[in-house]
Image: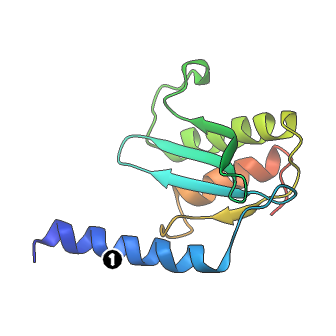
Amino acid sequence: MNKNKLKAKRQWRRRKGTRKTMIGTADKPRLAVFRSLNHVYAQVIDDLEGHTLASASTRDKGMGLDKTGGIDAAKAVGQKLAERASAAGVKKVVFDRGGFQYHGRVKALADGAREGGLQF
């Protein structure tokens, strides 16, 4: 099997395993994180209704970031997401790291969201 296909399959399995145990509801939605090489994306999702309640990424126009792939950018995304989620009436979330290790940019995003007022 191709090395990149194998990596993608392993990551898909990790993501699927973490999603088995968590589900986003209206009172406690799921905060889903995706990171690529250059950007970080986050969404607050109500899985029962299938709606995204709030989202933020390093690609948003109002972020004003110099670098989009670093820890500082991820923390800014977490703070912006917390601001948008609180505007939508969300205080508590379930954190879905999306199969990524909880360190670096994923941890920085979580810390930024906590600083913004979200509770995990």
Query: Residue 119 at what x, y percent from top left?
Result: 85, 58
Farthest residue in the front direction? 49
Q: Is residue 44 found left or right of 1 in the rendered image?
A: right
Query: Residue 11 at what x, y percent from top left?
Result: 37, 71
Q: Write down the quadrant of residue 89 in the picture.
A: top right
Classify mark 1: helix, strand or loop: helix
Q: Which residue is drawn at the image coordinates 48% and 71% (left, top)?
A: 15
The residue closer to the viewer here, 67 or 97, is 97
- For label 1, the residue is 10
Q: Which residue is drawn at the image coordinates 71% and 54% (left, top)?
A: 111
The N terminus sits in image quarter: bottom left
Eyeballing the image, is 102 above or below 63? below
Q: Is residue 97 found left or right of 7 in the rendered image?
A: right
Query: Residue 106 at what x, y percent from top left?
Result: 56, 58
Q: Write down the quadrant of residue 80 in the picture.
A: top right
Q: Write down the quadrant of residue 20 in the picture.
A: bottom right
What colouring does the structure picture have?
A: rainbow
Query: Residue 37 at what x, y percent from top left?
Result: 35, 47
Farthest residue in the left direction? 1
Q: Which residue is drawn at the image coordinates 55% and 65% (left, top)?
A: 103
- Residue type at mark 1 is Arg
Callout count: 1
The C terminus sits in image quarter: bottom right
The residue closer to the viewer here, 80 or 48, is 48
Q: Local crowd at mark 1 within 10 Å, few (<14), some, or many (≥20)?
A: few
The residue closer to the viewer here, 108 or 95, is 95
Eyeballing the image, is 29 above or below 72? below
